[in-house]
């Protein structure tokens, strides 16, 4: 315990937001802003698109990129696509629904597979969290 407190005292305390928008504090993260009286007073998390994302988050984004690319290839070559309604009944997509789904999936591939995707997604999450603080919807 004393060693942990000494480490925090020596390096400082950092504040960061995870993928679910939860705020965390620690003494060793590379993807956060250093807490000062000024940052505490403004009650916000900095939006820094160049911040380094945690390694596990980078790995998760890379995994999602691979999965999205596979889905995109399947959807692009499929003659028919099917969905399920809230009751669990299967239905065939119309041509319009297929086009919308393919476009949505292509957008997701671009978001998750672009250079520095994890850092950009982390910045998006921070901005969304800041907006939720301003509108009072944080934690919902």
Image (tube, helix red, strand yellow):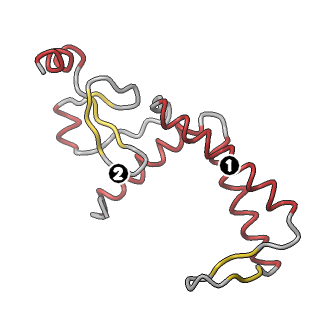
Q: Which residue is mark 1?
A: 67
Side of 23 where 92 appears, left or right: right
Circle on res. 108 = none
For the point 14% across and 20% down, the residue is 5
Element at badge 1? helix
Quick one: quadrant of the C terminus? Answer: bottom left
Q: Is residue 55 above or below residue 77?
A: above
Q: Is residue 27 above or below residue 130?
A: above
Mark nearer the viewer, 2 or 1: 1
Numbered circles on residues, count = 2
For the point 23% across and 30% down, the residue is 35
How far across and down, in percent of the image, does residue 120 sit?
54, 40
Quick one: quadrant of the N terminus? Answer: top left
The image quarter in which residue 79 lies: bottom right
Q: Which residue is mark 2?
A: 130
Side of 59 where 126 appears, left or right: left
How many other residues sit within 10 Å of disc 2, few (<14), some (14-19) or many (≥20)? many
How far across and down, in percent of the image, does residue 25 sit?
25, 35
Q: Is residue 91 above or below residue 101?
A: below
């Amino acid at each position: 315990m004393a060693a942990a407190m000494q480490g925090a005292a020596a390096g400082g305390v950092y504040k960061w937001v995870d993928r679910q928008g939860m705020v965390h504090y620690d003494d060793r993260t590379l993807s956060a802003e250093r807490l000062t009286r000024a940052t505490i007073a403004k009650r916000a998390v900095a939006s820094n698109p160049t911040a380094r994302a945690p390694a596990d988050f980078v790995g998760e984004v890379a995994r999602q990129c691979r999965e999205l690319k596979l889905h995109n290839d399947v959807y692009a070559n499929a003659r028919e696509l099917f969905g399920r309604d809230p009751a669990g009944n299967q239905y065939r997509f119309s041509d319009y629904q297929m086009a919308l789904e393919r476009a949505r999936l292509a957008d997701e591939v671009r978001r998750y597979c672009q250079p520095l995707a994890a850092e950009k997604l982390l910045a998006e999450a921070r901005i969304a969290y800041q907006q939720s603080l301003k509108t009072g919807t944080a934690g919902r």
